[in-house]
Structure formats: C-alpha cells, structure tokens
Amino acid sequence: MSAALPVLILLSSLIPAGVTFFLAQDSHRFRNMLNLGGATLKLGLIIWMLRAVADGASYEATLSLAPGLVMLLRVDALALLFISLSATLWFLTTIYAIAYFGTKAELSRFFGFFSLCVAATTGLALSGSLISFFIFFELLTLSTWPLVAHKQDKPSLAAARVYLAYALPGSAALLWAIIWLESATGPVLFTDPPDLSTLEPGALRAIFVLFIIGVGVKAAIVPLHGWLPTAMAAPAPVSALLHAVAVVKAGAFGVVRIIYDVFGAANVVALGVGLPLAALASVTIIWGSVRALQQDEIKKRLAFSTVSQVSYIVLGAALASPLAMIGGLVHLIHQGLMKITLFFCAGIYDERAGIKTIAGLNGMGARMPWTSACFSIGAIGMIGLPPLAGFVSKFYLGLGALEAGAPWVLGVLVASTLLNAAYFLPLLYRLWFLPAAEDTTGDDRAPALIGPAVVTALATFGVGMLAASAISPLGWATLIVTREYGP
Amino acid sequence: MTALVVVVTLPLLAALAVLVLPERARVKLALGSVALGVLAALMLARAVWQDGAVLLTLGGWAPPLGIALRADGLAAALTLMSALVMAAVALAARFEMRTRRVGARAAFGFWPLMLLLWGALNAVYVSRDLFNLYVGIELLSLAAVALVALSGTAQALAAALRYMIFALAGSLLYLAGVVLSYAAHGTLDIGLLGERIPAHSDALALGLMTAGLLAKTALFPFHVWLPTAHAAAPAPASALLSALVPKASFLILIRLWFEAMPDLASPPAILMLAMLGAVAVIWGGILALVQKRLKLIVAYSTVAQLGYLFMVFPLAGGAGSAQPWSAGAWTGAMFHALSHGLAKAAMFLAAGICIAAVGSDRLGDLRGLARQLPMTSFAFALAAITLMGLPPSGGFTAKYLLMTSSFAAGQWPWALLLAGGGLLAAAYLYRPMAALFAREARVTARPIPRVWQAVPLALAALSILLGVLSATPFDLLQIARPEPAAEGL
C-alpha cells in the first residue's frame, strides 16, 4: 500500500484528464461525473493519508528512468500540506467550473487540461527528487497554457504567449540550476540534503539565484511577475485555480523546497542569500500592493494582490527562522483559501451581473448579498484583521522576522497591511454603502457558483478561529517545521 | 539471427515484388511487409536485449575474408524506431492516396521507393563493412532523391536535383576515403580497422569519409539542400526523409569515429564537428523562425535538431566511469536520434493531414484548424514538446543526458547551447501551434478520417513514452556500445 497510495492519488486526476480529452463535447453528464468523481476520490484518499501520516507513516513510490533521472513520489508532511490544499480547492473549483461554463464550447478540452493541471500540481507536491519536481513543474507549464488561451480571442492568446515567454526561460534556468548542482552532488533527493561542500560558495550562490529565477517566474516575484496580470484574460475558474493553488503556489512551494530541502536553511544563511531574497520578496509585497491600488478592473486588482501576497510565503522561507517558516507555510494555505474566494466572487459578479470594473460594484451588496458577503470576508482576511486567516500568517511572519534578526520586515508587514486596506476597503465601501446605479441587473441565485465561495469563505474564518487546534493549517505547519527541520 | 536476416532482406524483396503487382495487391503487400518488418524489428531488439549483439558472418567466413552483419543495441533501437515510423508512414500514405488524387506515377512509385529506402536503412544499421555501408547509403540516397521528385512539379524536380548533387558529391568523397583506407589496411571491416596499425593516410581517409557523410547528414553548411527537398516531397515521404535518412549517415559517422578510428579524434577535429553542430542548431532555428509554410518550418527544424547529434563528439564519456551517467552523452545523442525520428515523422504526417484538409500549408491558411482536426493538432503539440526537449519526453531525456555530461566534463558552453536551442525550438514551433489553435472557425476544411489522424498521434505519443519509460531504451543502447562511448574520444 505504501507505494500504491501516492500513485493512486496522482492517477485520480491523471485518469480523468486522459479520458476527458476523448469525450464528445456534449457528453456533459459523464464528463462532470468523471471529474467530480476523481476530485472526490482524491479528497478521500488524502484524508485517509493525513491520518496515517500524523501517526508517522510514510509513503514512497519510485520509477527509475535513465540513470540520474529518479522519479520519486514521496509523501511527507510538507507535501501533504500542499496536496490537501490542491485537492480541496480542485473539488470546489470543479463544481464552480461546471456551473460557470454550463454548456459552452470546447469543454472536453477545458476539463481535460484542468485535470491535467491538477495532476501536475499533485505530482509537484509529491515529488521526492529534484528531477521529478522539474518534470511536474514543466507539465504544469504545458497544461496551463491551453487554459489561459481557452477563450481563443486576441487577449487570451496574447496572454498565453506572454505566459510561455516567461515560463520557458524560467524552466531553462531551473534545469540549468538542477544539472549544475547534480553534476557535483549526484541526483538530489529531498530526504537527504545533498553534500554541498564540493562546490565553491560562489557557484552555490549562482545556483541558488538560478533556482530562484526558475521558480520565481511562477511565484511571480518582481521583476518576473509580468505574465500574471495579463493572464487575467483567462476564464474565472482558471484564474481562481492559477492564483490559489496551481501555478503561483507551485512557484512558492518550489521556493520552500529549495531553501529547506535542497540547500538547507543553515546553508542559505551561511551563503548570505536568504536576506537578499527576503528583501526581494519585500519589494514584491510592496510593489504588488502599489500596483493593485492603480487597477480599475477587479480581476487585475486581485492579480496584483496575488503578486504581493504570494511573496509572504517566499519571505517566510527566505528568513529561514522556524517561526517565519511557519508563517510562510501557513500562508500557503491561507492565501489559497482567501484568494480563491475572491476570484470565485469576481467570476460571479462578471457572470451574473456583467461587472468587471470596480465602479460597477456600487450597491451590489444588497443585490447579491451572498457573493458580496463572501467577497468581504476574503478581502478582510487579506488585510489581516484578526481572527481571520491573514492575521495568523502575518503574526507568525512578524515573530519570525524578529527571531531571524530582521526587524525591518515588521515595517514591510505594516506597510503592506495598510496598502491592502487601501485597495480592498474601497471595494467593500462601494459594495455596501454606495447606492447602486439605475440600470444594474443581476442576482446571485446560482447555488453551484455561490456554494464553493461560501465554503472557502467559511474556511477563511475557520482556519483563523481554530488556528490553535492540531488539525488546522497552523497546526500542520508547526508539525512540519518541528518534525522536519527541528525545533 | 533470423530476425537480422529478415530486417535486411524483407524490405528489398518486397520492393521488387510490388513492382510487378497490380495496384490493390501492391498496397496490401506493402502494408503486410511493413507489419512483418515491425515484428522482425521487435524480435531483433528482443534477441539483442537477451543475448547481446547479434552477429552474422555471411557464408560463415569471418572478416576480412567474408562480410559481417552485426546488430548491437544501437542498431536494434534504430531498426525498431525506423520500422515504427515506416508503419505509420505506410498507413498515412494509404489514407492520403485514397482521399487525394496524387497522380498515377506517385501512386505507383511511392511503394517500391519506400520499401527500397527502408531496406537500405536497415542494411546501413547492421553493416560492419565500409563498402557495404557505401552501397547502403548510395541506395538510400537514390531512393530518397526519387521520393523528393515524386510529385513531378518543377519545384520538386529542382529540389531533387539539388539534393542529388549533394548526395552524389557526398558519396564520392566517402568512397574516396574508403579506397584510401582499404589501400592502407587491406580491410573494410570496422572491427578490424579498430585494431589496425595506424597509417599516414588515415587522417585524410577519415576526413574524406566524414566530409561526404556530413553532406548527406545535412550538417551546416551542407544543409542547403534539405529544407527545399523535404518540403517538396509528399508529406509521408518527407516524414521518411527527415526522420530517418539523416540518421543513417550519422550512424556511419558514429561507427567511424567511435569504432573504426577513435584514435584519430584530435581536439581540433572534435571541436570543429561540434561547432558546426552548434551553428546548425542556431542557424536552423533562426531560419525556422522566419518561414511562412508549415513544412518548411518543420524541415528547418530538422537542420537545427541534427546539430544536437554532433554534441556527442566533445561530450561522450565526459563524465568518466565514476559518475552514474557514464556514457551519458553518447546515449543522450542516440536518444535524441530516436526521439527526433519519432517526433519529426509525427510532425510531417500531421502536416500532411493539414494539407489534405485545406490544400495548403501556409500558416495563414491553417488558422483555427485545431477545431476540425483536434487529434492532429494535439499530435503536433506532443511532437513539439519532444523537439523542445521538455519533460517527460524522449527529447528531454536526451537533453538531460547531454547536459549533465557537459557539466560533468566542465564544458558548460555546450549545455548553454542545448538550453538555448530548446528555447529557440519553442519559439519557432509556437507559430504553427498558435495558428492551429487560433479562434477562427473554418468551414472549408475537408473532413479527415479519425484513423488517419490517429497515426501521427501514435507516433508523437511514442516519442513522449520514450522519455516516460526511458530505462529500457537506455539499457538497450548500452548493449555492445563501443568503448570510447564511455571513455570519450
């Protein structure tokens, strides 16, 4: 069983992906059952595994390719954290996407690549070696390209082109870094950190920079973030997935893996590359927020907010102190929950009321109360008001910064909180306090669209309120840091 | 051993037989012999896998008295890959001839030429004798030139003529080298040449043979004949020409440099071969980037992709036997030959389907075709992944092995070329893909049977599978590989 389970989890989204491609466009029922079935099965398997891993079980599956290429699927606590997020949100997004698209064209293609994208994220989470990480990282790039281009109009195709223009050089940098490192140390497995002593510090720094460029494109670290706001041309479920679990998170997850499992936190500090990365992450946090302020389109504003928020995770990892690490890891989950709520709602506003810009939100609180309530919870969580999810992350990041001896990070956190408030509060004000324009239409009587948003909004509440319990994301993050990286 | 005999003789006999048969029986026989050939190639690979290299001395006379045929892992892998490509090409050609009027000459000429080409390829793969190799490669060139000329248009004839001039010049140079070598050593057997007492004329002989083979492999700057010739031929023929034909002359180069005369490999010579390869990667990529026709893009991509193969000369054995990827570069280059063969054939067959559907291969005319031809477009995309060297394709495995070796050998500029070449491939393959997947709804496209569409898809999927299941082909390639492959030139 211990080898079969990770493979089964991977197959639970890979098989639906493979089958969906060959389905006729109008076999809606079968396609929906297949995708929902896969998502449900995966969720079940993961819950089962969560319990086993909490008891100390470990799972591993290897496939040997050519020498040096080790495909290793391995479940550790960090993998599980990411995979639970992606499985939960895949399930919810599938429900949302089925309702969102209805009977529109090219759905077999869409759901095929959608499932493939989730399979890639799963594989990424489960990867136990650098090479399998890279393979799934690339699979992710390739499977998200058709999703971004899905509408096939000019902006979508342009966005997809920009995405590839950023992603492919990024992966070239990543492959370069991997091969450079492995040519000195042999294949790198995450279980036992490679012996870095054979490489010069200068070379190691260069490798680290290449690694960060490679995963930083996906994590949208400034100045590699340009593709993300353009990718907003994609349909709402895609944006939701892209911003909450798939691409951006894969990048952030990669940063965590590289710092903790490839280089090791101590080496990152010794090489003196942690603080520059933390500084870059801080710049990204501030810059993303400032740019978000300037956007009039809801989705664009959310996109820049993602740029800013994801760098919290990078910041937490780069500070390389246990508490900061906890803050970063927990934000991986929290940001996912909050951002997907916001994108679900943005999609509903667009789909049900045709609202794309901020001005259109005036007075929608009364007309679309469910949507607006969820949106508000997500936004307030992002700002970091206690006891919502965002507060927990920022609290631990702040403590971690002090622990790492970088008190200036507190300033960044405060500034970012103020900026978050500055770009989210006006939206809430418009929603609830301004009168609606005369000709507004729209309602939110679409349970399959609202349902997922309500669930994630409640989760945003829940993970903050129950942060002290062992099964909360915070509990898991603490477990990971204490178990794998020592107290 | 039977399998070895069958893979060489079956295509040649079939080529003769189809000449005298009426049309219906002709196609049936061709398809039947292709099926049999795939089986024989599989059996050959199995025999090599189980018992090591298969050796056949004709009439029981060992060289230098007799002539030897020998299938090592590399030959077995190439034979199998070629058989699979042949099968796909034969199926696609049958569909194409059913849906399009190709003219009586093309319908008649294609089958014997295809089989002849196949027989010549297999003969080259397993021959151990320089003169036999000459006969094989000459036969190959003649069949290939005839295939280019098959459509009979002025453009095709001009392209074929240009091809023939290069091919004949290449043959003459090669033959001159063979004669010099024979005069000095009195043997043509590759194995015996490996143990020869060095002679003064060796360098000249090797240089002549190499120059001739480079012209046939279309390495920069001898590539000028390739794009027009490959684009002018009917699509199934282009698939053969691009995927298989250059591999034969490349294989002879490998036999010469790694088995017959590895002692002659001086650093400047190696560097020059690799530099030409590097220029081919870049120049071919740039030219592919500016083409407006699908088949030309794919043909220039062949120019670029062939360049990677020449990285084997500086990188082979770069890691030394202590590394886990000993002989990585040599195997990587061979992996590239295999995966490029599958992917490039898939691309040309996909292009053939596009042409059958809209009657043109200008990128502008292909816009939005993915809606009508989803499987074909998907096949093209999968093949593109292999050519870009993205995981988990066979192209990625090849590139990974080459890149690790170049780092381990401390020659990282070659790795830079490999990475850059991949990005260039992404750039030039993006244009046809963007055209195929554009939004425009076409109504004029002719319907294409799904089975036909499945043919390139199967080939492209194989090129991906080659990477996913790379352990077995890797081990197969190690069987009886020459010593310098592990130790370097």
Image (cartoon, coloured by chain):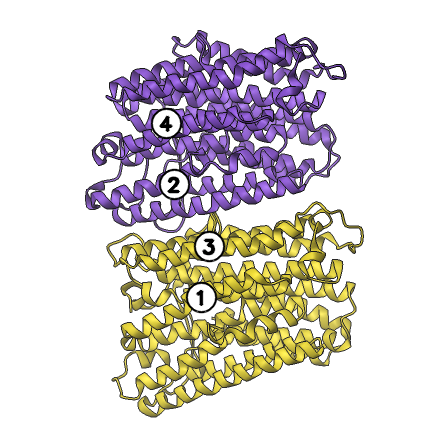
Chain colours: A purple, B yellow
Q: Give me the disc on residue B422.
A: 3
Residue that mark 1 sits on:
B307
The first of marks 4 and 2 along the sequence is 2
How would you rate the neighbour count of disc 2 (Cα within 10 Å): few for under 14, some for 14-19, many for 20 or more?
many
For the residues labelled 4 and 2, the Cα–Cα distance comes to 16 Å
Residue that mark 4 sits on:
A282
- Chain of the residue displaying label 4: A
Residue that mark 2 sits on:
A213
> Looking at the image, do the residues carrying marks 4 and 3 touch, with CB atoms under 8 Å apart?
no
Amino acid type, label 4: Ser
Q: Position of residue B472 (x, y in %)?
A: 43, 53
> Looking at the image, do the residues carrying marks 2 and 3 touch, with CB atoms under 8 Å apart?
no
> Looking at the image, do the residues carrying marks 1 and 2 touch, with CB atoms under 8 Å apart?
no
Amino acid type, label 1: Gly
Q: How many marks?
A: 4
For the residues labelled 3 and 1, the Cα–Cα distance comes to 12 Å
> Looking at the image, do the residues carrying marks 4 and 2 touch, with CB atoms under 8 Å apart?
no
For the residues labelled 4 and 1, the Cα–Cα distance comes to 44 Å
Q: Position of residue A342 (x, y in %)?
A: 56, 20
Q: Is residue B463 visible?
A: no
How would you rate the neighbour count of disc 4 (Cα within 10 Å): few for under 14, some for 14-19, many for 20 or more?
many
